[in-house]
Image (cartoon, helix red, strand yellow):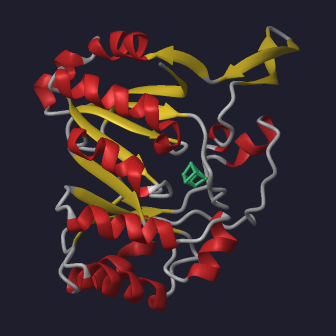
Amino acid sequence: MNGIVFDIKRYAVHDGPGIRTTIFMKGCPLRCLWCHNPESFSLQIEEFDQAKRLGEKLVQEKIQIGKQYSVKGLVKEIEKDQLFFDESGGGLTFSGGEPLLQIDFLAAMLRECKAMDFHTVVDTSGFAPKEHLERIIENVDLFLFDVKQMDDEEHKKLTGISNKLVLENLAYLIDQKKNLIIRYPMIPGYNDSHKNIMKMIKFLTDLTYQSEIHILPYHRMGKDKYERFNKENNMPDIPSLNEEDTLWAKEIFEKAGFQVNIGG
Ligand code: SF4
């Protein structure tokens, strides 16, 4: 059983409780305009040319994005971090890309993690067959679940997919009473209308979800990666949001009874 991972981030503090190791799995069926990990799009291991400075000279080198791991191999990697997990109440976060795309590997990894008593988080766009969630649900302690845009036509324009399955899966997890945190990437001019926020609140409260929402303010940090990794960038050059720019939305969510964080 092998999986393709494009990054492993240690000592992560924004991807769930405590100090965590975040596994970034390659492959994503969405194409969010604002995505800052375009190197995650393809499920394949890829090679890119990159300029590197050697003294006065610029030389070209090949870099590989994505590495194949066996379940055993990846477990060996993460075991090194157990001390930090134990001391901080942290654990493993599976992110991407879309981790549910490599469901067999993800399910096997989550089983191993639970056997070792690690706290597990899955950070997902929610775009996957419901059966994928059913396969992993008992081994996931917390889902970080993106809600981007409630209007389906707008959602298609922004991400390339319908939000129907995403919202059905969200309803399923709420119905199962899973621990989950909604993540709302706030993109100025694209999904930050009062109408979208109110629709989100209605959808969640109708499902009796009234717990945590994390607002993720738009930033341009991944911009240069599109050129570096030869990916088409369709996001206009708009400025990043500061925390203060999102306070009005925070207030609306809070008034509706949610606990709101800005950032992860
Ligand atoms: S779901 Fe995440 S990884 Fe996939 S395109 Fe959107 S922002 Fe990027």
- Where residue 143 appears, x then y in whole percent? 30, 51
Residue 222 lies left or right of residue 264; in this view the side is right
Q: Is residue 185 visible?
A: no
Taking the spot 20% from the left edge, 57% from the top edge, the residue there is 178
Residue positioned most to the front: 131
Q: Nearer the viewer, residue 235 or 122?
A: 122
The mark tally for this picture is 0
- Where residue 94 appears, x then y in whole percent? 39, 37
Q: Is residue 223 visible?
A: yes
Is 101 located above or below residue 165 in the figure? above
Q: Nearer the viewer, residue 188 or 144?
A: 144
Residue 75 lies left or right of residue 159; in this view the side is left
- Residue 48: quadrant of the picture: top right
Residue 165 lies left or right of residue 40; in this view the side is left
Is 73 located above or below residue 12 in the figure? above
Taking the spot 25% from the left edge, 36% from the top edge, the residue there is 120
Residue 26 lies left or right of residue 81; in this view the side is right
Is 14 located above or below residue 110 in the figure? below
- Where residue 218 appears, x then y in whole percent? 53, 62
Q: Nearer the viewer, residue 32 or 179?
A: 179
- Where residue 43 appears, x then y in whole percent? 65, 35
Is 136 located above or below residue 129 in the figure? above
- Residue 46: quadrant of the picture: top right
Taking the spot 27% from the left edge, 28% from the top edge, the residue there is 111
Taking the spot 64% from the left edge, 81% from the top edge, the residue there is 153
